[in-house]
Amino acid sequence: MSHPTQDLVLSAHLSPAEERFERMRKRLGWYLAPVVLVVLWFIPFPGLSVPARHLFAIVGMALTLWMTEAIPLAATALLAPSLCVLAGLGSAREVFKPFADPIIFLFMGSFMMGEAMLKHGLNRRFAFSLLAMPWVGSSPARLYAAFAGITAFISMWVSNAATTAMMLPIGLSILAELGSRQGLANYRATPFAAGLMLLTAFAASVGGLATPIGTPPNLIGIGAIERILGYKITFFQWMRLGLPVAIVLAGFLVWRFNRLCPFPTLSLTDHHQWLETERANLGRWTRGQLNVVGVFVGAVALWVLPGLIAAFDDRGSASPAYVWINAHAPESVIGLVATSVLFFLPSDSKSESFTLEWREAAGIDWGTILLFAGGMCLGELMFSTGLAHWIGSGLAALFQSHSVVGLTVLFTGVGILVSETTTNTASATMVVPIAIAVSQAAGVDPLKPALATCLGCSMGFLLPVSTGPNAMAYGTGCIPLKSMMRHGLWLDAVGWVVIVGTVLLLGPALPAKP
């Protein structure tokens, strides 16, 4: 049985011109990456030490490979740290230490939880149950709102790509039903088909902003802030920023697509009945579904609990309960324990099968985990060699920005721009440490610029290559490229404003040093 993501990717159709461009982009990377490595290796940049210059060359090569995708992204993430060891920038134990960072295990736990949800069909049960509600079927605008809300909510807990993969087939089913009732032979060429597919992809990326585990750049930013600044962003603190941003952007998506890509004005009563039938066909809740929901709710409660304690206890993060939970039950451990419980809980006592089997858990996106860890290796070396400070000082001098507001605006835009041409994960890995370095060089609190940069790195909506959800939605054949670019540009612009405003108003500040 093929994976839905694979089906969608295989269905992608590129024009001959686009295929030529992709081949040229990869071929360019094969030749350009070694040239970048050699040239930067030997250029004597003023104020840059030899180890920092060698790291600069390796980082330049890695960025070239990531942007051109000449080799798989995860392969680049393994190659770059290996070259750092060969260059004498640190021992293998030191350089590869981030591969065992607790955040890596939080990744594993959340990815495996997502696999359990997919295995037991919780995505379809949750989606059809909400879409079949009477208030949804009575209005085309509410259909947009319901679909955006469901997609964004699932993406808060499951990866953006997995959420898109589970929601696109449901959206295509809805479009096929509406198309048949309208007598449309090619319903995929209609504006409302493009609207629903774009809404699905964009809402999946937007929903991922709301929680630390929603998308890899969030964890990258949290990890960089904790390692470099010594400040821990709690689950609750992140949601205090990310959730308002996600809600506002999801609302903007609903408004925009309902206005520019409206559904047919016919009554959706029959459509509602079809959804009710689909929901009824799901049958009763299975034991496996109940197991996953119970473990999932428990994990979320424990993730949120420290933040709630800090918010309602006058002592804040100095509360004994807060300190104890953070010391004994950090987010990564909770994720691993919750996932491990799924291996113990039987889903069918007769066949002796369990809620999660290792063959399913082993199918998680290990490439993203390797990409994340490899990027963390380079990020740490950028600081230990002084490269990050050198880059930060140069950018601070170039843009003459010496305030929290100016740097927050600047690096949110940089994060958005870089994410248009490379993965959000790679963007956050590189840009967040630089934002911190620039802020420190300018003598301002780096926390808000770093948080805004991290959120901005999830805003790439302009092109199919900008994000996995964009690529999968484009592969359905419903979205003209110019339509994605037009709507994506508007969402990038609105996201820039919303992120900057939210972080400046609600973002925390580093506590004053005694």
Image: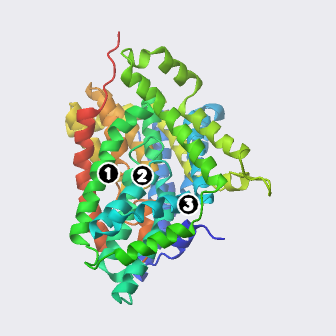
Which numbered disc, 3 or 1, marks the residue that appears first in the sequence?
3
Residue at numbered disc 3: 71
Q: Indicate the position of residue 185 as horizontal and vertical percent values.
A: 39, 90
Q: Indicate the position of residue 135 as horizontal and vertical percent values.
A: 32, 63
Q: Amino acid at mark 1?
A: Ile
**Viewer-side residue, 495 vs 424:** 495
In the depicted structure, whether residue 229 falls above or below residue 214: above
Q: Which quadrant would the C terminus be assigned to in this image?
A: top left
Give the total number of marks visible in the rendering: 3
Mark 1 near mark 2, Cβ–Cβ under 8 Å? no
As drawn, is 184 to the left or to the right of 69?
left
Q: Amino acid at mark 2?
A: Phe
- Count residues near mark 1 (Cα–Cα under 10 Å), then give few for <14, some for 14-19, many for 20+: many
Q: Indicate the position of residue 471 as horizontal and vertical percent values.
A: 44, 66
Residue at numbered disc 1: 416
- Count residues near mark 3 (Cα–Cα under 10 Å), then give few for <14, some for 14-19, many for 20+: some
* Residue 491 position by quadrant: bottom left
* Residue 500 position by quadrant: top left
The alpha-carbon separation of the residues under discs 3 and 2 comes to 33 Å
As drawn, is 283 to the left or to the right of 459?
right
Residue found at x 37% / y 85%: 181
**Viewer-side residue, 307 vs 422:** 307
